[in-house]
Image: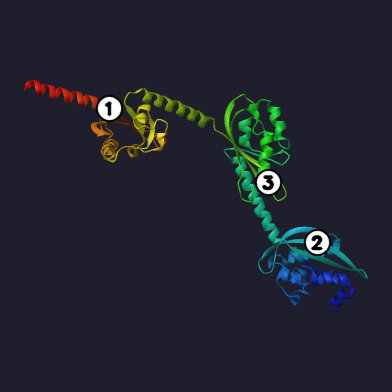
Amino acid sequence: MKDKENSFENIENPFKEIWDNTLDGMRLIDETGRVLLVNDAFCKMIGKTKESLEGEACSIIYDMRYRENMFIKICERFRTGNIESHFERKLPLWNGKRVWFELSNSFIKMGKGKTLLLSIFRDITKRKSIENRLRESEGKFRGFVEKSINGILMVDEQGIILEWNYKLEQLTGVFKREVMGKFLWNVQLELSPSKYHRLLTYEEFRDILDRGRAAPEGEPVFHWSEITFQNLDGNRKVILTRFFPLKLQESLILGGTISDVTERVSTEEKICESENLITGLLNSLLHTAVVTDQNGNILFYGNSFSSFLNKPEEDLTKFNYFKLLPEESAVHRKMFFDKLIESGTPLYFEDVCFDKTWENNYTIIPGHGSKCPPKIILFSRDITDLHLSGKEFKETIEETTE
């Protein structure tokens, strides 16, 4: 082909080196839309040989359905001199594939009024795939942040707020638009100098980041704190803050979740009050009293029980009730315990344990679902002296009768 030979003759040696060795696909077409030259990289991208491309219409690389329209567009560019110099586009190829390309176009004046169009193709399909995955990840992250039941805070290495989600707006009474790009410390001071407005002190912030930098790869670093916080409405809440460093490629940022645990703390305080009341009642009894779960694990006990076992300083809630008794007594009492669980009816019985005679009363407290399971109250009264007195009285009567 004469035009092809002339084109090569007019390509300077340095440019020919680039043409032959670049990883970018390069194509040269004339004013009629006919392909004059393509390099090896272009052939590899398109999936055709040089022989099947050079001398053919430039639209041959496209899906059959788009060829005519593509050819008309290219001829129109020559006619008007108007081209898109640089763009990214997903092109439908002849083999059914749709490939993302970054394209650069430029006209080359060859003399004698002849103009050629040089197009440089770069396959960016992988890059686009990565970008799409990043966008999906960002979308998922954004959805997680906005729909989270916890407040989410993110701060850069200087302490500038990067994220302040909707839940955190509710907890603090401060809108995201009012804090983004500001220093966390300034925001906390604007709320109030009171300690009840501090999610995190500057010293804590620096300590978390310093520990994050020093920690080996993969080792978690956390800062937990349960504090009383007062929002702009004046309402005080108990919040649980969990802060941690996040390592990026070239920097470190601070992430944190903030949870309203006011209800949980209130419930714990009520439970603690109830437990203190139960323990106080058990301590006021003269006989031994123990409260267990349905497996016999000790939940509460009175001082008389720990004194009887000679374990006044030990926490007996670590033990199972029956493990603390002699084996024979444990088996006997466990039999009544199981009957109580099965029938739900209080049981009274006497037995001998630790060489003493006991009057026992086992009672079950019904539960209310999984959060409040049934409990067993085990009362035991030492009646050894009563038995001895009865025996002495009987012996006296027998002697008098004789």
- Helix, strand, or loop for circle 2? strand
Residue at image position (75%, 69%) is 42
Identify the residue at image location x=68%, y=42%.
209
Asked if residue 29 can be seen in this view, the reply is: no
Secondary structure beneath label 1: strand
Residue closer to the observer: 355 or 364: 355
Of the numbered discs 2 and 1, the one sitting upstream in the chain is 2
Disc number lying in front (2 or 1): 1
**Towards the viewer: 47 or 202:** 202
Determine the image quadrant of residue 371. top left
Instruction: Choose mark 3 or mark 2, whichever is in front.
Output: 3
Please identify the quadrant where the C terminus is shown.
top left
In the image, what residue type sits under mark 1? Asp
Name the image quarter holding residue 381: top left
Q: Residues within 10 Å of mark 3 (few under 14, many from 20)?
A: some
Identity of the residue furthest to the bottom in this view: 1
Q: Which residue is mark 1?
A: 382
Residue 361 lies, with reference to residue 75, above or below; the image says: above
Q: Which mark is residue 213?
A: 3
Residue in the picture at 60% in, 46% down = 220
Q: Is residue 339 above or below residue 94?
A: above
Residue type highlighted by circle 2: Ser
Q: Secondary structure at mark 3?
A: helix
Name the N-terminal-most of marks 3 and 2: 2
Counting from the top left corner in percent of width and height, residue 174 is at 66, 31
Residue 104: give its label: 2
Residue 217 image position (x, y, % from top left): 64, 51
